[in-house]
Image (tube, grey):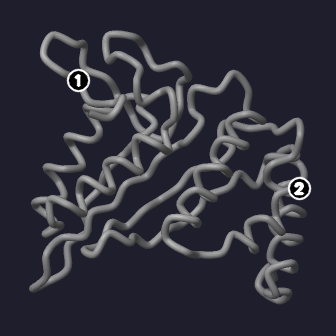
Amino acid sequence: MSAATTGAGEAPTLGSLTGGQLRRLGAVAGLTAADAETYAGVLADSLGPVAERPLSLPPPNRTFLSDDHTPVEFSLSFQPDAAPALRVLLEPGCGADSLAREGRAGLEAVRAMARRWNFSTAALDGLRDLFLPSSPHGPLALWIALELEPGGVPKVKVYLNPAARGAKRSAQTVREALDRLGHRRAFA
C-alpha cells in the first residue's frame, strides 16, 4: 500500500483522493487499470510529502493552480469518435517552505519522470538559471502537465514562471529562453 492510500480507519489523504480520482477518470479515458495505477503512483511520488497530508488539514500553501488550492487539477479533452484524453496539472513541491525549495522539488519531479520515461531534461536544465533562480519571485515555481495515454507513458509539459527573476524582467526572461532554445525570431 502506498503512503497516499488509506486503509480502514485512516484519514483520507490528498494522495488517496487524487489517486482515486485519477483511477476513475482513467477508466473513462480508456486507460487500463495498470496504466492508471502507474500514473497514480507517479502523481503521489511527484507530490512528495503533501500526498500524505490528511484532507482534514487546510492546504499547506494556497496554490492558484486550482480553485480549491489543491496542487492537482484534472481535465478531459474530447475529440469526435475517440475516447477522451485525461490530463493532470500538478504542482510538485507545493508544501515547501519557500518558492526556491518548491522549484527544486519540481525540477526533481521532472527528472524522476525523465528517468522513468526516458526523455531528456537538457532544454529545461539550460533554462534553470532563468526560471529557477536562488531567490525566485512570483506565485509559482514549476508546474507539470501530463496527458495520460494508454501504454503508461504520458506526454509531459513543464510550465515555468517568466517573472521568477522579477516581474519587470519577465519579457527579458522569455526572450532569453527563446534564444537559448533556438527560436531567436519567435519573441518578435
Q: Which residue is mark 2?
A: 129
Query: x%, y% of residue 180?
Result: 86, 78
Q: Quadrant of residue 135?
A: top right
Label 1 CA crowd tier, 10 Å (few <14, some 14–19, many 20+)? some
Q: Reply above or below: 80 against 27.
A: below
Label 2 CA crowd tier, 10 Å (few <14, some 14–19, many 20+)? few
Q: Is residue 72 left or right of residue 106?
A: left
- Pointer 2 with pointer 1, Cβ within 8 A: no
Looking at the rendered image, the quarter that the N terminus falls into is: top left
Q: Reply above or below: 83 against 157.
A: below
Query: Identity of the amino acid at label 1?
Result: Thr
- In this orientation, which residue lies closer to the viewer: 148 or 139? 148
Query: Identity of the amino acid at label 2?
Result: Asp
Residue in the picture at 39% in, 10% down: 57
Mark number for residue 6? 1
Looking at the rendered image, the quarter that the C terminus falls into is: bottom right
Q: Quadrant of residue 101?
A: top right
In the structure shown, which secondary structural element does the residue marked by tag 1 occupy? loop
In the structure shown, which secondary structural element does the residue marked by tag 2 occupy? helix
Query: x%, y% of residue 13?
Result: 31, 23
Residue in the picture at 80% in, 49% down: 132
